Image (tube, rainbow, N blue to C red):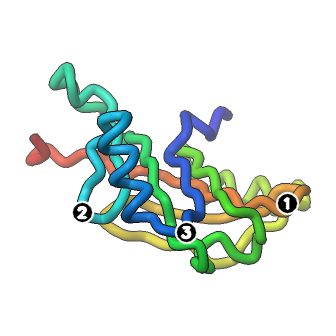
Amino acid sequence: MKYVTGIGGIFFKANDPEKLGEWYRKHLGLDVEEYGGVTFREGAAAGVLPKRQAYTVWSPFAADTDYFAPSEKPFMINFRVTDLDALLAQLRQEGVEVNEQTQKSEFGYFGWIMDPEGNRIELWEPPEVSDASP
C-alpha cells in the first residue's frame, strides 16, 4: 500500500524567522501568514477542493526550537500520508525508530520517526474536508 502522498512541509531553523519571512515575502512574493509560514493549498487557485486538506507548508522556526528533537539537524521534512496508524505499525515492525507520541488536532494527525542519519521526519495525515468547507 502506498502511504506517502506528497511533501507536507519544509521546516527549518532560522536565526530571525520573522525577518527571514519578510525577506521571502518581499523578494519571492510568498504570502507569509501571521503564524510565520506559507501554506500552499492544492487546487485553491482552480477552486477545486481535494478529499483531504492537502497542502504544503513552508515555515522557518526559531533557531533554538526543540521541535525537531531528538534530531540535531536544522530542518525537518513533513510527508503527507494516507493511513498514519498503519504506517507507524509497519515502520515499527521494520525496526524504524518511531516516536510513541502522536498528535491529533484540527490540522490533522501527526506522528514522527527518525531516519538512519538522525533526521526527524514528521508524518501527517491531513483531516478530511467537511461539506461546510469553502
Gap in Å between the C-alphas at discs 3 and 1?
A: 31 Å
Gap in Å between the C-alphas at discs 2 and 1?
A: 36 Å
Measuring from the top left, give residue 120's x and y in whole percent.
72, 62
At label 2, the amino acid type is Glu
Quarter of the image containing the C terminus?
Answer: top left
The residue that disc 2 covers is 34
Whether residue 52 is visible, yes or no, is: no
The residue that disc 1 covers is 96
At x 31%, y 48%, the residue is: 128
On screen, residue 84 above or below 3? below
Circle 3 packing at 10 Å, graded few (<14), some (14-19), many (20+), is few
Quarter of the image where one finds residue 133: top left
Measuring from the top left, give residue 74's x and y in whole percent.
69, 62
At x 35%, y 48%, the residue is: 38
On screen, residue 20 above or below 40? below
In the picture provided, is 27 more to the left or to the right than 34? right
As helix, strand or loop, the secondary structure at mark 3 comes to loop
Gap in Å between the C-alphas at discs 2 and 3?
A: 18 Å
Name which of mark 2 and mark 1 comes first in the sequence: 2
Quarter of the image containing the N terminus?
Answer: top right
At x 20%, y 20%, the residue is: 46
Foreground of the two, 8 or 88? 8
The residue that disc 3 covers is 15
